Amino acid sequence: MVQISSKSGLAIVLSHLEGFYEPKVSYEQYMMDSEVAASVLWNAYLLGDVKGKDIADLGSGTGMLGVGALLMGARHVLFADIDKCALKIAKNNILKVKSEGYTIGSAKLICQDVKNIEAKADLVLQNPPFGTKVIHSDAFFLEKALEIAPVVYSFHKSETKAFLQRFSAKRNAKFTHVWNFRFPLKASFAFHRRQIHRINVSCFRFEKE
């Protein structure tokens, strides 16, 4: 049985997962950086939010956060995305880590718009669209996440911190931790002019009161 024993080890495994074949700009599909994902997942593990937990990965894309949670001992992970192609890749990534000898919990994949998801979990992990194509889509994701679980880890543009504080307070939640990153967005579309564009992104840990 192969186990993950360090943050760097987790990052290496995640870096070998498949990314999007044909990312869709309307869904703001970008491959999550493996180092960023590993950092957040490791912190979540140390805080006791992952091992043995039922977790939902909303807007799961190719499944990096959800697969990482399974590698860190999650009991069950729900992968939810509106894109069937992304979910197929996520399924391949789950099978990949299993084939490499990792013992992981169970997984379920559903193709559904986030607003229609009905589920309950101990934790939501999500890297939602930032709202550049569909305004406030990040807020829709956060609202649904807070309905599903008492603890939520959610990535947002750092500049929206004050808005997120007000938004979560109205829903009887607050963020307890904030991790800041220079988030690398790798060139994925024809209109991109730089190979890597870095933006200020934070992962917020929300907890319902």
Image (cartoon, helix red, strand yellow):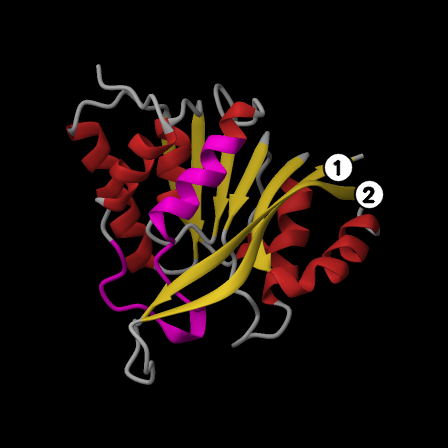
Q: Would you say residue 93 is visible in this rendering?
A: yes
Give left or right: position of 124 versus 4.
Answer: right
Residue pictured at 26% horizontal, 55% vertical: 19
Residue 196 occupies quadrant: bottom left
Check residue 2 for magenta coloring. Answer: no
**Which residue is at the far left?**
99
Determine which of the numbered discs, if any, sits on residue 6 in the image: none
Residue 122: x, y in percent?
Answer: 59, 29
Give above or below for 77 relative to 133.
Answer: above
Residue 74: x, y in percent?
Answer: 44, 25
**Distance from Cα at disc 2 to Cα at disc 1:** 6 Å
Q: Magenta residues?
A: 19-43
Q: Amino acid at mark 2?
A: Asn
Q: Amino acid at mark 1?
A: Lys
Query: Circle 1 is placed at which residue position?
Result: 208
Determine which of the numbered discs, if any, sits on residue 172 in the image: 2
> Split into 4 quadrants, where in the image is the C terminus?
top right
Q: Are marks 2 and 1 in contact (CB under 8 Å)?
A: yes
Nearer to the camera, 140 or 120 = 140
Check residue 25 for magenta coloring. Answer: yes
Give left or right: position of 27 versus 207.
Answer: left
Give above or below for 24 relative to 55.
Answer: below
